[in-house]
Image (cartoon, grey):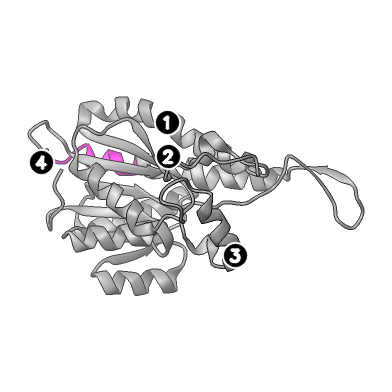
Amino acid sequence: MQLDTSVAAVVTGAASGLGEATARLLAEHGARVALFDLNEERGQAVAAEIGGVFCRVDVTDDGSVAAGLAAARARHGQERVLVNCAGIAPGRKTVSRVRDTGALVGHEMALFRTTIEVNLVGTYRMIAASAAGMAGLTPVTPDGGRGVIVTTASVAATDGQIGQAAYSASKGGILGLTLPVARDLAPFGIRIVSIMPGLFYTPLFESVPEEVRTALGASVPFPSRLGRPEEYARLVRAIIDNDMLNGESIRLDGALRMQPK
């Protein structure tokens, strides 16, 4: 599917990092972009810069998603592209020791549930709601293509490190749903592909000391650096452009394989 001014797109987590880079690149190629995020100040600023529309959306809430999609569609029409970048990455071991008392405690279940709700359930909520709208569109490719969905998993889905049980489970779930969703949506001409980023320089790294960032970048075989959000965005564009990419999960990691810690 070609990107041009006839294509409306929705990007979640679009106020920063991978989502922001994707929103910017899609807009550069003519797409009418709706930015979904909880960070209203930053989201409004990015939307103004790229000529898009910002919608404050909580992907864990059905009503918030429905209202965001309604607002985006009122402005740009039904989206043909959905890119899911909204997510959180808490770190907590399955069993850890309390620093002050030395007591051993298990992983806080509320945090585990929240991680799954945001990263996995939130992604699927967006997929289901967006695809229901895409399915009624007129095809725009010779094969009958109507839309494209991109999800964001992680190399942690298969290479989860110490303290990443919740995060890895949520991202592994995204891998697991990719093929069955592709099969579900095939009769409607809607494709879905998951991207598995490695170590990318996003706002999560801004509080990390420079020497730590350098060491992490050096752990990547080639190129030996942190990934750039625009490189993720370029892969999103390639997925949209290549109609044969469907039901697949693509590592974007410079050949990185994560060590236990």
Q: Earlier in the sequence, mark 3 or mark 1?
A: 1
The N terminus, quarter of image: top left
Residue 206 drawn above or below residue 114: below
Q: Which residues are magenta?
A: 128-137
Residue 103 showing in the rendered view: yes
Q: Earlier in the sequence, mark 4 or mark 3?
A: 4
User: In the figure, is residue 1 to the left or right of 103?
Assistant: left
**Residue type highlighted by circle 3:** Glu
How crowded is the residue under tag 3: few (<14 C-alpha within 10 Å), some, or many (20+)?
A: few
Q: Residue under circle 4?
A: 140
Is residue 134 one of those drawn in magenta? yes
CA distance separating discs 2 and 3: 37 Å
- Estimate the x, y position of residue 64 in percent, counting from the top left: 43, 55
Q: Earlier in the sequence, mark 2 or mark 3?
A: 2
The label number, if any, that marks residue 177 in the structure image: 1
How crowded is the residue under tag 2: few (<14 C-alpha within 10 Å), some, or many (20+)?
A: many
**Residue type highlighted by circle 1:** Leu
Q: Earlier in the sequence, mark 4 or mark 1?
A: 4
CA distance separating discs 4 and 1: 25 Å
Residue 174 drawn above or below residue 205: above
Q: Residue under circle 3?
A: 211
What is the secondary structure assignment of the residue under circle 1?
Answer: helix
Q: Residue at x 28, y 74 (%)?
A: 49
CA distance separating discs 2 and 1: 8 Å
Q: Residue at x 25, y 53 (%)?
A: 9
Q: Residue under circle 2?
A: 124
**Residue type highlighted by circle 4:** Val
Q: Residue at x 24, y 27 (%)?
A: 186
Closest to the camera, between mark 3 and mark 1, is 3
Q: Earlier in the sequence, mark 4 or mark 2?
A: 2
